[in-house]
Amino acid sequence: MNTPSVFFRGINWQAVGFQALGSVFDRVFRAVFPIDQGIPAQTQGRTPEIGRSEGRVGRISLVGAGPGAADLLTLRAVSRLQEADVVFYDRLVDAEVLDLARPDAERVFVGKHVGAHAWPQDRINGVIVAEALKGRHVVRLKSGDPGIFGRATEELDAARSAGIPVDMVPGVTAASAAGSALGRSLTERGAANVLVLATGTGCADDPTPDSTRLSGPGTTTALYMAVRQADRIAANWMRQGLPATTRVDVAVDVSKPSERHLETTVDTLVADLAGHGATGCAILLVTWPMPVEATGNSGQQSKRERPDTGSGLRKASREIA
Ligand SMILES: C[S@@+](CC[C@H](N)C(=O)[O-])C[C@H]1O[C@@H](n2cnc3c(N)ncnc32)[C@H](O)[C@@H]1O
């Protein structure tokens, strides 16, 4: 295995257009791992236990690509990308993240082009296993965290049933990135002690899951894949008693050049999403206020009452760049 300094300096950062990122990695690794010592065992994940391609034993790594920006990848994710012989990636993975793979690694798009069908999950399971059985190191690059609405279970099961070593590398999930982009915490002591990650879009058996059923006073709900379901979700919330004027933050394309934020309320959510042309690649964040007796305040955390986060958010239902 390469020493980290060689490993990271071996990347042609200039060629891939990441000089600044490369130099940051280089500096971090030189400081943390002196050149001759290599990567300490505890930072290597399970790599040593995994078969190496030279021995014709392949392996599969499910790697979290984060929300978009390459500098939100973990160092372990970059390491797996550099080791990969073939990278299978989908629609939400940014080109700049893919550029961190070795130049000679094969790259295979398994997502959905506009107007076309996505690869069925069974087919993806089949090809990653087939490639690993050839003795190759396969990276399955998934947006955000592979274990959060990423269908990782099917791919883990396929690898394990074929006897192929498989590991997972966590990534920054979209809800977490959205909170940071908006300059707000997803939890707040005494005000939001529960965090729910939910999807607005279900599977064939349950296409419209009740994404709001775990919401309640003192809960922050982060909704994935919810833009097209906003009508139903807002109606469910209000039926359950969430004040109509409760603030909703919408973070679109977080950490990508097209990132946008929208601040609205539950009752104006649908109109504002349509009015601002918010796409499907968005996270909705809602904190259900605590009852008045619990907080001693109005109990309605409306958009007008929250302090400006300093992230550039404007008041009222308006979009910010
Ligand atoms: C199939 S899920 C994948 C989630 C991913 N595994 C994660 O942990 O973030 C796709 C949904 O994640 C959310 N998402 C992914 N990337 C995003 C981004 N950069 N900005 C906003 N939402 C994002 C959107 O709700 C999108 O519809």
Image (cartoon, helix red, strand yellow):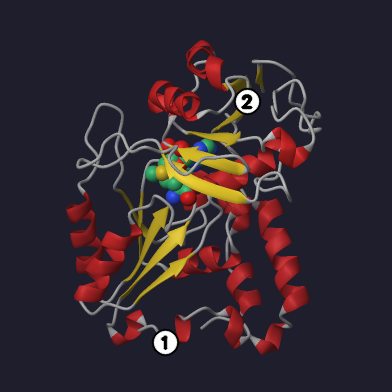
Tag 1's secondary structure?
Answer: helix
**Residue 284 or residue 215, whichever sits in front:** 215
Indicate yes or no: mark 1 CB to ligand 1 under 8 Å: no
The amino acid sitting under disc 1 is: Glu
Residue density around tag 2, few if under 14, some if 14–19, many if 20 or more, within 10 Å: many
Question: Which quadrant of the figure contains the C terminus?
Answer: top right
The residue that disc 1 covers is 49
Sequence-earlier tag: 2 or 1: 1
Please identify the quarter of the rendering in which residue 40 is found. Answer: bottom right
Relative side of 127 to 297, left or right: left
Image position, residue 312 (x, y; %): 77, 27
The residue that disc 2 covers is 246
Tag 2's secondary structure?
Answer: loop
The amino acid sitting under disc 2 is: Thr
Image position, residue 292 (x, y; %): 72, 33
Identify the residue shown where x is 59% and y is 50%: 194
Please identify the quarter of the rendering in which residue 155 is found. Answer: bottom left
Indicate yes or no: mark 2 CB to ligand 1 under 8 Å: no
Q: CA distance from mark 2 to mark 1?
A: 50 Å
Q: 131 above or below 281?
A: below
**Residue 153 or residue 217, whichever sits in front:** 217
Identify the residue shown where x is 57% and y is 49%: 195
**Residue 205 or residue 321, whichever sits in front:** 205
Query: What's the mark number on residue 93?
Result: none
Q: 320 above or below 189?
A: above
Image position, residue 125 (x, y; %): 22, 60
**Residue 133 appears in the rendering:** yes
Q: 295 above or below 299?
A: below
Relative side of 305 to 147, left or right: right
Image position, residue 24 (x, y; %): 73, 60
